[in-house]
Amino acid sequence: MAPAVRLLLPLTWPWLLLALEGLVHWNDGPGLLGALELMGLLLGLPDLNGLACWSCMRPWSSIPIRDCAEPLCDLPPQLWRLQPHPYVLLGAPYGPQGSPFRLRYGVIERLLLAQAHLQRQAAHWRLAIFDGWRPLAVQSFMVEHTIAELCAARQLDRHLPAVASACAAASTDTVSSTDTVASTDRGASTDAGALEHSVDLEHSAALEQVIADVGRFWATPSDDPATPPPHSTGAAVDLSLADAAGKPLAMGSPIDAIGAVSEPNHFAAVAAACSDSAERLQALQWHRRRQLLAAAMKEAGFEQHPNEWWHFSWGDQMWAWRSGSAQAHYGRTF
């Protein structure tokens, strides 16, 4: 971690927490605590063991897990796979026997029920599976990748280097007198230090926003058996809709998109606010497709992630929390 950040963290930690608390919705997904763990990944803090234990907490983290020991199984051919898989293409470490197209046996059975329900409503559509089981190493890899990708999109240097070029620019006034150089040296140094501090604070705030944004969509890669990331249990699935030929339908945003556009009811609000009739019809179409997917999954017993139109689970802690079950049936599996 850059020296400037090490210097700033003790001073900025209290307001940093307050800022993140305002940025992250406590009742919608990971919340502040998940954002803190992701912040540690971003800043490269050397030892986050204590913080990691704290930050893995979610509204569902206290729910006990009594794993039923059901096996992970490959998806059957009736369930369409969206391939090539993007995480595999990125080099995510699934291992020689790993596959994103595996889920617990009971989850697969319910997916088939969900597809049957969907096709009673839309005979020529089918479920399209994007991602299933995700080992902890892949979760960690994708969290890092998403942070880096979002930093690049927002033109942020995730390693927070000292802003040498800005400081140099502030102290490179050309003077002809040796006496003038001596008399202005202290002032230039002070100005450069103030500029570095100001730029570092602005950069830190932007990076905190990245962490808060990523934390709403990506679970902390916790290795604590009591707080497994949902996908590591084989109970969570990311999916969309496709036509009879397997072509994915437009749903308003891609899977894994960071932002409000991925919330399940986002386009209902967009349609209500639209004055342009064509834009309103498009928003309503996307909303109805999301609703159709959600209804089919709900019919089969799944629960939906509050921030993600594509994420559903059956049997994990999030499912137990949203369904009111006293315990989860699946813990982390290998």
Image (cartoon, grey):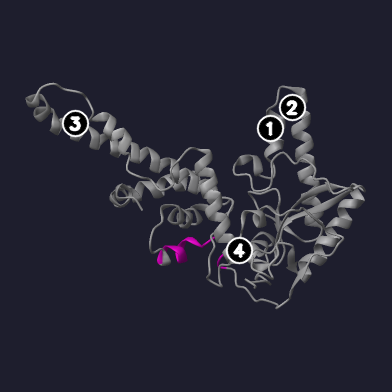
In the displayed structure, 112 sits above or below 259; it is below
Residue under the point 54% across and 62% down: 221
Q: Are marks 4 and 2 in contact (CB under 8 Å)?
A: no
Number of residues whose C-alpha sits closer than 10 Å to that of mark 4, classed few (under 14), some (14–19) or many (20 or more)? some
| Residue 144 falls left or right of residue 40 | right
Label 3: which secondary element: helix
Which is in the foreground here, disc 4 or disc 2?
4
Check the picture and name the quadrant holding the C terminus.
Answer: bottom right
In the displayed structure, 180 sits above or below 203; it is above
Question: Which residue is identified by label 2?
Answer: 279
Question: Which residue is identified by label 1?
Answer: 270
Q: Disc number at residue 172? A: none
Q: Disc number at residue 188? A: 3
| Lower position in the chain sequence, tag 2 or tag 1 | 1
| Residue 102 falls left or right of residue 230 | right
| Lower position in the chain sequence, tag 4 or tag 2 | 4
Q: Rounded to the nearest whole Å, what is the CA distance between mark 4 and mark 2?
A: 41 Å
Q: Are marks 2 and 1 in contact (CB under 8 Å)?
A: yes
Q: Position of residue 120 (x, y in %)?
A: 92, 51
Q: Amino acid at mark 2?
A: Glu
Which is in the foreground here, disc 3 or disc 1?
3
Q: Are marks 3 and 1 in contact (CB under 8 Å)?
A: no
Number of residues whose C-alpha sits closer than 10 Å to that of mark 2, classed few (under 14), some (14–19) or many (20 or more)? few
Label 1: which secondary element: helix
Label 2: which secondary element: helix
Q: Position of residue 128 (x, y in %)?
A: 79, 52
Q: Rounded to the nearest whole Å, what is the CA distance between mark 1 and mark 4?
A: 38 Å
The segment highlighted magenta reads 50-62
Q: Is residue 25 visible?
A: no
Q: Position of residue 57 (x, y in %)?
A: 51, 62
